Amino acid sequence: MNATQIDRGRIESLVRRAIAGGLGTSPARPDSSPANNPPGWVDGKPNLRVSISARHVHLTDEHVEILFGAGSVLEPDKDLYQDGFYAAKQTVMIVGPRRRMLPSVRVLGPTRGASQVELAFTDSISLGIDAPVRHSGHIDGTPGCVLVGPVGSVQLEQGVIRAARHVHMNYFDAEHFGVSNGDMMQLKVTSHDCTTIFDDVLVRADEAAKLEVHIDTDEGNACFLDGASTVELTKGGCGCHK
Ligand SMILES: [Zn+2]
């Protein structure tokens, strides 16, 4: 490649950014085509979404067959905002100690290497399970429960957690905010009468994620997310972990 070709590539990239409306407002980016339109960006900027992640279950392929019958697979019902993830048509009953239970808890797909139940604090109290706050997938030493489907049931030895609040983002979002995978951020939800700041929002960055904070139903209700006028995500946090 000679100098003329490089210049031409740069010019084309600038033109594409100008057409996308980002020129002059977004930081300089590498000259690859995905850089001009990172996943989830609108008008050349990150587009923050804050979603309530209601109680749900992740299942292994094996557990899907035990609960729903041999040969069963998860059937997508509704796509989630993150590409490739969906709410399945299937639900399961979660049974805790002394037969306390939550009926009809949604299964999210695709399947995973380990089954996991994600609850809000209120859910864990009503089930009688002392579920710890954990990052998704980090389930060693957590309590278990029984899952009941229409065909069979599964005794989970572990995997019941309250999912730690987190923000999905791609590497362009991470660069925009000056953060890396594993960092903590702060979310401010401005609502009439109950503006709330959440510390300890874990950054989960990868190639393809769209900028989205996940909080649970208790957190979403506490800050009256549905009535929020603005949501702001900032680098920082309480500083007590670093
Ligand atoms: Zn999430």
Image (spheres, rainbow, N blue to C red):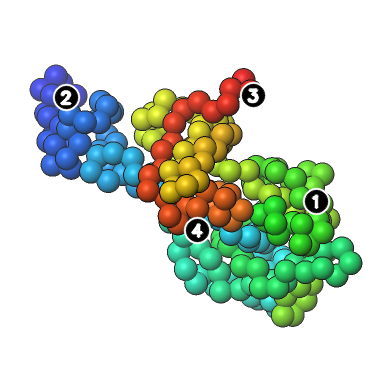
N-terminal label among 4 and 2? 2
Residue tagged 1: 130
| Relative horizontal placement of residue 183, taking residue 24 as reference (left or right) | right
Choose top left, top right, bottom left or bottom right for residue 97. Answer: bottom right
- Report the amino acid beneath label 2: Ile
Q: CA distance from mark 4 to mark 2?
A: 38 Å
N-terminal label among 3 and 1? 1
Q: CA distance from mark 4 to mark 3?
A: 31 Å
Q: Residues within 10 Å of mark 3 (few under 14, many from 20)?
A: few
Q: Residue at x 15, y 21 (%)?
A: 2
59 and 91: which is toward the camera: 91
Q: What element does badge 3 sit on?
A: loop
Q: Position of residue 201 (x, y in %)?
A: 55, 37
Q: Residue at x 66, y 54 (%)?
A: 120
Does the CB distance between marks 3 and 1 fall below 8 Å? no
Q: Looking at the image, is mark 2 or mark 3 nearer the viewer?
A: 3
Q: What element does badge 4 sit on?
A: loop
Asked whether mark 1 lies closer than 8 Å to ligand 1, one says: no
Q: Residues within 10 Å of mark 1 (few under 14, many from 20)?
A: some
Position above or below: 199 against 150: above
Q: Position of residue 12 (x, y in %)?
A: 13, 34
Q: Looking at the image, is mark 4 or mark 3 nearer the viewer?
A: 3
Tag of residue 6: 2
Residue tagged 4: 85
- Report the amino acid beneath label 3: His
